[in-house]
Image: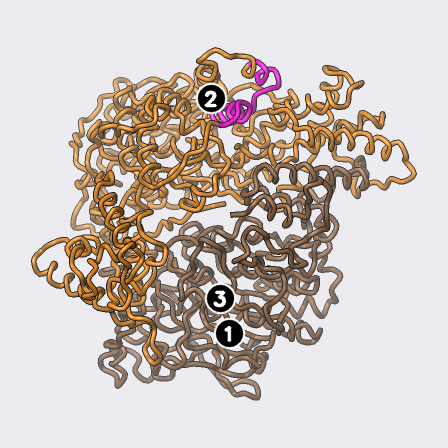
Chain colours: A orange, B brown
Amino acid sequence: MSRRTHLGFCAVLIVLPVLLPTGLHAKPAHKKALIEFFGPALPKNLHDCHTCHLPSQPGIDEGAKPHNVFGARLAALRKQFRKDGKNSDLISRLEAIAEEDSDGDGASNYLELLSGHCPGDPKDKPTAAEQTTAHQKLADFRARPREAYAWRPFEPVKRPAVPKVEQVEWQCNPIDAFLAAEHKRQGLQPQPEAPKPILLRRVYLDLIGLPPTAEELHAFLDDHSPHAYEKVVDRLLASPRYGERWGRHWMDVWRYADWAGYGAEVRDSQPHIWHWRDWIIESLNADKGYDRMVQEMLAADELAPGDVNAVRATGFLVRNWYKFNRNVWMERTVEHTAKAFLGITLNCARCHDHFFDPFTQKEFYAFRAIFEPEEIRTERIPGIADVKQDGIPRIYDAKADAPTYLFHRGDERNPDKSKVISPAVPAALGGSFEIKPVALPGAKPAMSTGRRLALARWITDRNNPLAARVAMNHIWLRHFGTGIVPTEFDFGRNGKPPSHPALLDWLAAEFMAHGWSMKYMHRLIVTSRAYRLDSHANPDSLARDRDNRYLWRMNTRRMEAEVVRDSLLYVAGQLDLTMGGPDIDQHHGLTSRRRSLYFRHAAEKQMEFLTLFDAASVTECYRRNVSIVPQQALALANSSLALEQSRLLARSLAQKVGTSDAANFVKAGFEQVLSRPPTAEETAACVQFLREQTALLANGQKLTASIGAPISRVPAAANPAQRARENLIHVLMNHNDFVTIR
Amino acid sequence: MYSRRSFLADLGMGFTGLALAAMLHRDGVVRAEDPSWPPPDGKPHFAPKAKSVIWFFMVGGVSHMESFDPKPALNKYAGKTIAETPYKDALSKSFLKDNLRIVVPNDANGKIRPKLYPLQVGYRKRGQSGIAISDWWPHLGECIDDLAIVRSMWTTDNNHGAQLQYHTGRHNLEGVFPTIGAWVHYGLGSLNENLPQFVVLGTPLADCCAGVNGHGADYLGPEHQGVLLKVDPKNPLLFASPGADKFREEQQAEFDLLGRLNRLSGIEYPDDASLRARIKSYELAFRMQSSLPEVFQFERETEATRRLYGLDQPATHHFGQVCLAARRLVERGVRFIQIFHGSNGGAGAWDAHSKLRANHSSLCRQVDQPIAALLKDLKRRGLLEETLVCWGTEFGRTPGAQGGDGRDHHPFGFSVWLAGGGIKGGIAHGATDELGFHAVEDRHYITDIHATVLHQLGLDSRRLNVPGRKRLEIEYGKPIRDILA
């Protein structure tokens, strides 16, 4: 289910996390703090209000529940601590009175808390036996490993020490050590490794976006060498399909969109921007460093003058082009450059200083000034005279002296022309931002301002606090289904805190230390034990961590829209693996056999089949939504695509395994479509179906046609037994396990 | 957590691998492993007054003063600051602090606007009840004797996270929670197994302000989330039929096998809420093939009815279709229909920080006639008695001016209304102060609307919960007894 909890407010949509000490709303936060601090040590009955407050009394407003003596003591300490300039958060105050006996019943506050009694109620006190147990609990609690890791996303990444863990199987990969330490702290029992077929399908879909074929499944099941899995991983990362799979992920983050407009009028993005898409795929397949990719997207024209291939990368900026208003174009550029590469909501500082993070309104416009000189042109491709036919839409600095003004309250009608804003990056993020103009011999203009190159170098400098953290969080999200920071585009104070801050920092450090190699990091992640865990639930861990925040099991996920469509074609052996080239008309989605990422994707030009499965929003998509609605069922049950592929696959499977043994056909179908053998019950159900369906179809008098003309270009088999087999394959393509990645 | 056994009970699957009976849990099967917690059995907790709910939501924040809570004092003191009026105590009320979960110092929006802005539209008393509402709602004015206007709403977010909050009852900073439609879906059985029971019409909320979570089910599981239907009579349902070269009986057998295989997976993964949702979505999809396209055949309505909804006029054509679709869905037993108006990819069309007069007059023109038509149409068909219609928005707008001609966000007092479904008509309940600033009489937090909806459907909001997911006091709300017939 979707957990897009973060609301990206800005401009008119601003909220601040200043919690007022009103009785009504402080309680949940305090309760949460207690639960987080004590963790499993806190008895369940003490999560409640009466720990600090008197029980409800008639006549007293619920919003003003008075404190008991313990709560009153805590409240008084707040004032005192503030006066003394000390940290006055609840836990600091609690620790200060841990050994006190607030209610004077002879048991200290902590002993009462840990034995499930109220420290503010003298009538409620632990028995002698309970006190003994609580003493032990307190000693254990005091001795517990502390999560003392400070999460400071706006300071440069320091590589944290890898935790020492006891279990041998969680020691090999540093990622596992970080996770295992947290499992222990949270009292979670991780699942065992997933069965081989499940794991194989998981890693195939994850790395190349296509499931393993039956042959690949068998090869893996038969490979008993110690590194069978690692061999598969290496092969998948070397496959050109990898660049397509992860290219689509990055196209989400980098907001890929083909041109949109009315009729032939281009209003958004640019024609031929698919060159940028191809650059993404090629760069990923070549394992170009992430730092270099960012640099080329922001400033290939300045970094590699004259390199037509590299300048394709500036499609990242071209995509923001907007016909009717240059301010919109510039604002989009600022917003999404900051969100995609830095995970900050600089856009919130357009009308006023940022409410959460240390970015001023002036810095929004200073960031804009970096892009102010840019314009778009279509670069001629050698051999193609007409850029309308084909060409590379690219960025260049057209007007070095174009001024940037601060708009009063973000209103473009109200620019402050008294002062030209100079290009700069947010000071709070540190680093040095040095602009050096770049000479472009033979080009017009012959100089580029070098502003964008300076930005690119500042972002990808190893001291930039955010670039590697944000990128690794995106990669992690797509491997595990949840990000370490749940708000991928907001690492600021309005974002949500990370589940494993030290791990994310370690990943970021490791990423940069290995030349920003994404393939290196993918390999590290997918060969971890954590990645290989089974997705079943054990009741104890489920009760403690229902949302699997601490990854004690693998998250079950649904295929993204593109993977659903590609896999349908692929399992039937029909997917056209041609790479790259111009965007394909989205109306051909059910008839073309090309991979889904090559189809036109723009406002009002999206393939319906993909949209139904929550394809990327054209405006922004830092993470996909996941819905389950009946329209998806109809797309898989009633589309010509699914009908045709099921018929084609049934035909080829019948040829391959023969038709004499129904169980054999069922097995082949499961292995090809679901990448696993059927269970005995499944085989029995399917064999029975084949028999009954053949009989049903043989008796034409009892049959009524569905409404509408035939939609499938592949007719149903005339032979009832074969038609039943087609039906079976069609069912498997609709099986929950087909769209599910376990 | 769902145990293996309960999964089977829910999905009508016995250990023998044979279907026991469809929807066993509807007949009150209790999960044996968790005797402390009876899950909803699909039956109301007590005798319901309403069967269905139509839930209108105007996105962006409708001005209560220019709609359902006219304040002559604004005209009298126009141009003066609040401090210069006899009602200056509005600025020292504790609500200013207590009412807000969040305070935004120096925000460009969400501020107290001191300089009073006169009403931008006239108002008059309407109907037998003589309740005054603004002239931008002339058609709705004809229905005033069926409406219970609640003029004393408050919420705690002074920004558009309040859109999410209006539907979940929780402040957006606290995260995502099930929405009112999902709770209804969770609590009650189906009235028509051939249609989704929680339908969303119009464009859902933008990602800034709730996104799909505005009709989501969160921890209740995806089977309870709203199903978005596009009101497009020319293309009512994508992939509605496999075409003539698939026999109906052939397809039925395929779906039967699919259900059987997915249930076998359910034994393997008993706590997989997505699998449960998918099984149900397939069962529904099969039936929707024939049931849904017919819903949007507006040509089956009389010319007079289509005109009533304004299908013949450009301004009302679109929203008129949405409202007419809502009536046709109610007729067919859809339980909860959530209708958005004013989604614009951002904060919402009603967010009139400037040019309020042009903004609200034009938007009211789009919705006034269709909403009134829906009420009249339901009433003449005898459906209004069993259909609860709720109209709301995330917050009101400031009594003071923003810029020269707008109003800002205002969470301290605003209006909603309810009609039908056992609601008393022709009353105005609660009140804001003379300036329309604070809700002062019979104050209601937004979950009181949720509780009222549930109450009319025969559900006790306190009995709707899930083990391991504690609900806050404030989430339950209290039914607004004074407006119940």
Residue nearer the viewer, A626 or A370: A626
Q: Which residues are magenta?
A: A194-219
Q: Is residue B321 visible?
A: no
The residue that appears at 68% across and 58% down in the rendered structure is B27
Residue B312, numbered circle: none
Residue A461 quadrant: top left
The crowding category of the residue bearing disc 1, from other C-alpha atoms within 10 Å (few below 14, some 14 to 19, many at least 20), is some
Residue for badge 3: B462
Q: Position of residue A61 (x, y in %)?
A: 33, 76
Q: Nearer the observer, disc 3 or disc 2?
A: 3
Q: Is residue A130 above or below residue A433?
A: below
Q: Tell which residue pokes out farthest to the left in this image.
A: A84
Residue nearer the viewer, B460 or A572: B460
The residue that appears at 57% across and 75% down in the rendered structure is B419
Q: Position of residue A537 (x, y in %)?
A: 49, 39
Q: Position of residue A194 (x, y in %)?
A: 50, 27
Residue nearer the viewer, B389 or A27: A27
Badge 2 and badge 1 both on one subunit: no
Residue for badge 1: B417
Disc 3 is attached to a residue of which chain? Answer: B
Q: Position of residue A293 (x, y in %)?
A: 34, 24
Count of marks overlaid on the render: 3
Q: Is residue A259 above or below residue B151?
A: above
Q: Amino acid at mark 3?
A: Arg
CB within 8 Å, label 2 to label 1: no
Residue B412 quadrant: bottom left
Q: Tell which residue pokes out farthest to the right in this image.
A: A701
Q: Is residue A583 magenta?
A: no
Q: Amino acid at mark 2?
A: Tyr
- Tell me the CA gap for discs 2 and 1: 55 Å
Disc 1 is attached to a residue of which chain? Answer: B
Q: Amino acid at mark 1?
A: Trp
